[in-house]
Image (spheres, rainbow, N blue to C red):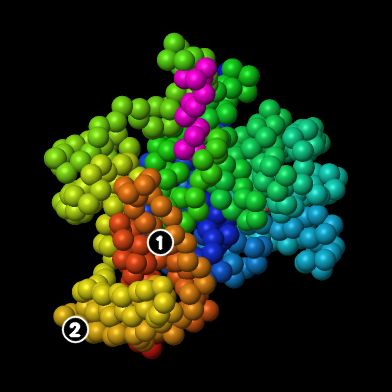
């Protein structure tokens, strides 16, 4: 009989901790809602002791998500566990995930403890977490390099202490599929109380084995798989969940297991994560890459036209990719725009059709045909603008030549109706507008990364600018999209200014709150 595999998503914890700039609460909520729609069983949404921002987002996600188990990470330390429980306290049921290094390297060189001390710490951590919830997961960090006898002992003790899920991470992506499945197999043979817990695996991709190792663990008895969408995560990343899910679906006859994931949401969730996290998906990435279902050579195209199964093992529709496309131009009505958004898997409630249609018409006038990626970018940027905007572009003017300096004059609406204007000169047009914007905002910051992507081809292309800026030791990300690349650059910086302004408001509110207390 086919058994269920629990899908545990850690995009918002292991994935997020590896990003260049941390995500805002609103961005994390957007991702959490998409993951809930995809019906992941458990989502790990943060490490609340690590920062007030992380605590806050775990709390906000706990208020909003109803159909997925929410989980937070904690070391085996009382204060970590208490704070994790506090962040999820609005929920009746939640999971606390405690972890502790068990390999010789981690025990002796990182934690400076011997094995007996580690076992004691693990038992105390699990028992502390059990004060708050019955749903406790324990991870033997660096299990892939842990001596198997020690691993069997600590797993047995963790189950006795009350852990309901035991996670075996290949933290540094060191094992090969046969080695990793042997670890799981040995646990099943040697740990007497193993049937009282779910065995989970959490594989990193340092040798490109994360998905292979996860699948090999299923064959050895693991029943929970941890990973992230698009494989984002520390260093080379985590097991890409969309690949694990589709491998389970395609190979169900051999693996004899299934998931309850809404597979039609996969493509959409992948897009949302890639956009919000600012990590592009390689075109040849399995399942969600833009070429994953594209056929180029004449022989392949001919074969596909005769029978799709000649060159496709998965129908693109399974993951929510539609094939029939309407051309969208300025003659299209809002029904066509809405239909296209629906075809791409977006619900009407996820974007504002009036705002989207207004920006769609402006773009269609400029470029002729509007493509899927344009529409998604417009919907995404409109969504971002639901945040209160303090800085709004009034207008800008730039003059540039090959032989001299560039001059820029920028005028911004700052707060309610105050228009501030600044003109400046520099050796390039982007630097000139950025200097003017910095002067107007008064924020002292450093531009760390500037990337320009062409969205589309030739004269139809849109310019998307992605920037990362450092302000008071924190990194802020901004996106701007326009047909004019100076305008995209200006929009990206204004996006950053608004993100900084909002972060400052949160700090002001927190200070006020702690004074009142
Ligand atoms: O990779 C790892 O070992 C982890 C643990 C915290 C589960 O992320
Ligand atoms: Zn990890």
Q: Position of residue 443 (x, y in %)?
A: 40, 84
Q: Is residue 282 left or right of residue 190?
A: left
Q: Residue at x 61, y 43 (%)?
A: 239
Earlier residue among tags 1 and 2: 2
From the top left corner, tell me how far across and down residue 396 is, in percent.
Answer: 26, 74
Disc 1 under 8 Å from ligand 2? The reply is no
Q: Compare residues 489 and 150 and report the one nearer the observer.
A: 489
273 in relation to 85, above or below: above
In the displayed structure, would residue 381 be above or below residue 404? above
| Left or right: 224, with 487 as reference point | right
Quadrant of residue 320 within the rendered picture: top left
Per the image, the residue denoted by label 2 is 418
From the viewer's perspective, tell me whether residue 179 is left or right of residue 30.
right
- CA gap, disc 1 and disc 2: 27 Å
Q: Which percent across, then down, holds residue 181?
A: 75, 34
Per the rendered image, the range of residues in magenta is: 288-301
Which residue: 18% across, 80% down? 416
Element marked by disc 2: strand
Crowd rating for badge 2 (residues with CA inside 10 Å; few <14, some 14–19, many 20+)? few
Q: Residues within 10 Å of mark 1 (few under 14, many from 20)?
A: many
Q: In which quarter of the view is residue 123 placed?
A: bottom right
**Secondary structure at numbered mark 1:** strand
Question: CB of mark 1 within 8 Å of CB of mark 2?
Answer: no
Residue 311's disc is none
Residue corresponding to mark 1: 465
Residue, x 42% and y 15% (percent of image)? Answer: 305
Quarter of the figure with residue 505: bottom left
């Amino acid at each position: 009989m086919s058994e269920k595999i629990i899908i545990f998503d850690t995009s918002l914890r292991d994935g997020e901790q590896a990003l260049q700039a941390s995500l805002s609460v609103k961005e994390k909520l957007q991702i959490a809602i998409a993951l809930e729609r995809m019906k992941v069983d458990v989502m790990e949404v943060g490490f609340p002791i690590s920062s007030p921002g992380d605590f806050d987002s775990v709390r906000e996600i706990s208020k909003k998500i109803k159909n997925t188990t929410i989980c937070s990470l904690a070391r085996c330390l009382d204060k970590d566990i208490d704070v994790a429980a506090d962040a999820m306290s609005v929920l009746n049921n939640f999971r606390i995930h405690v972890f502790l290094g068990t390999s010789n390297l981690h025990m002796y060189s990182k934690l400076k403890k011997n094995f007996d001390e580690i076992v004691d710490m693990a038992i105390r951590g699990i028992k502390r977490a059990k004060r708050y919830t019955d749903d406790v997961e324990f991870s033997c960090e660096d299990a892939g390099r842990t001596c198997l006898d020690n691993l069997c002992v600590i797993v047995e003790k963790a189950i006795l202490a009350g852990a309901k899920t035991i996670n075996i991470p290949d933290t540094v992506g060191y094992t090969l599929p046969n080695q990793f499945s042997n670890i799981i197999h040995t646990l099943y043979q040697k740990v007497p109380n193993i049937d009282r817990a779910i065995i989970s695996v959490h594989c990193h991709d340092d040798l490109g084995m994360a998905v292979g190792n996860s699948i090999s663990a299923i064959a050895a008895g693991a029943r929970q798989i941890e990973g992230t969408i698009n494989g984002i995560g520390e260093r080379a990343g985590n097991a890409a969940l969309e690949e694990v899910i589709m491998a389970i679906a395609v190979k169900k006859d051999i693996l004899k297991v299934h998931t309850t994931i809404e597979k039609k949401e996969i493509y959409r969730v992948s897009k949302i994560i890639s956009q919000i996290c600012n990590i592009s998906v390689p075109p040849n990435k399995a399942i969600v890459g833009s070429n994953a279902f594209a056929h180029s050579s004449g022989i392949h195209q001919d074969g596909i036209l005769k029978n799709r199964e000649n060159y496709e093992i998965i129908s693109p529709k399974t993951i929510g990719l539609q094939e029939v496309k309407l051309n969208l131009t300025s003659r299209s009505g809002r029904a066509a725009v809405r239909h296209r958004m629906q075809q791409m898997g977006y619900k009407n409630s996820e974007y504002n059709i009036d705002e989207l249609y207004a920006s769609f018409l402006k773009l269609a006038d400029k470029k002729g045909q509007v493509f899927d990626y344009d529409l998604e970018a417009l919907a995404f940027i409109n969504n971002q603008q639901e945040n209160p905007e303090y800085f709004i572009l009034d207008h800008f003017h730039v003059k540039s030549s090959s032989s001299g300096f560039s001059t820029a004059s920028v005028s911004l609406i700052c707060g309610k109706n105050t228009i501030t204007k600044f003109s400046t000169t520099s050796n390039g047009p982007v630097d000139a507008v950025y200097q003017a914007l910095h002067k107007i905002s008064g924020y002292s910051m450093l531009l760390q990364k500037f990337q320009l992507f062409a969205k589309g081809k030739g004269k139809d292309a849109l310019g998307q600018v992605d920037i990362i800026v450092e302000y008071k030791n924190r990194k802020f990300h901004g996106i701007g999209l326009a047909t004019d690349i100076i305008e995209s650059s200006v929009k990206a910086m204004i996006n950053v200014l608004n993100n900084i302004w909002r972060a400052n408001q949160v700090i002001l509110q927190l200070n006020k709150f702690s004074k009142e207390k």
